[in-house]
Every structure is written in structure tokens, then in C-alpha cells.
Image: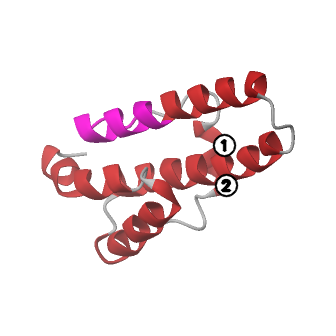
Amino acid sequence: MTQDTIDKGRTYAVVSYLTIIGSIIAIIMNSDVKNPFTTFHNRQGLGLCLSYLIFGYVQGLYDNWLITLPFMICFALLLIFGVATAATGKMVLIPIIGPFFQKIFANIIK
């Protein structure tokens, strides 16, 4: 992948990590151009946002700070990792769950 491709897709790659709305906006904006760098980060960002919503709902059922605090710290670190790799122009999978996101969203986000 060329540096020009990364530079053109960097903005949408970072936006894809900013909430579910940011992921949807980045997917729509990338649908015309089909930048592979942005597509990679769209899958990661959408997966991270959806898993946050799902696990957040389950965690919210317990209403306990001993469960909530590690959950929030974990997802904050994953979010910071994703934004940092997108901003620096790298295609690094999110630890543990990144390959899963690439596989399940491969047919949806092209």
C-alpha cells in the first residue's frame, strides 16, 4: 500500500473509531473510493463500537464499580490503540478481537 493511499484515508480511518455514528459515516464516505486502509479501520472501529454496546449492556446489568471500571479502562485502551494506529498510518489489528472483526465484517464492509 502506498503512502498516498494511507494519507487519503487517514481522516476517515480515525473517524471510524468515534462512536457508532462515526463508524457509519466513515463507511458511507469510503463506499465510493474504496480505500483499503480506511476499510481496514472501518471494520476495526465498527467492531469495537458494537462490542462496546453489547458488553456495556451486559455489564450494566450488574451495576457494580468492580466490574464497570475494568470494562471502561479496557475499552478506552482499545479505542486509544485504534485511533493511534489509524492516525500514524499503520494497519495493526486490535489485540485479541481484531482478527474476529476483520473476518465477520469482510463481506459487509468492502
Q: Nearer the viewer, residue 89 or 87?
A: 87
Across and down, in percent, residue 21 comes to 47, 66
Asked if disc 2 and disc 1 are in contact, CB closer than 8 Å, the reply is yes
Residue for badge 1: 100
Across and down, in percent, residue 66 comes to 76, 21
Label 2: which secondary element: helix
> Vertically, is 35 above or below 10?
below
Q: Residues within 10 Å of mark 2 (few under 14, many from 20)?
A: few
Across and down, in percent, residue 13 comes to 33, 52
Res 35 quadrant in image: bottom left
Taking the image as shown, residue 67 lies to the left or right of residue 26, namely right
Query: Which of the colour schemes (rainbow, by chain, secondary structure, one colour) is used?
Result: secondary structure
Label 1: which secondary element: helix
Q: Amino acid at mark 2?
A: Ile
For the point 51% across and 33% down, which residue is it?
76
Q: Amino acid at mark 1?
A: Phe
Taking the image as shown, residue 36 lies to the left or right of residue 96, namely left
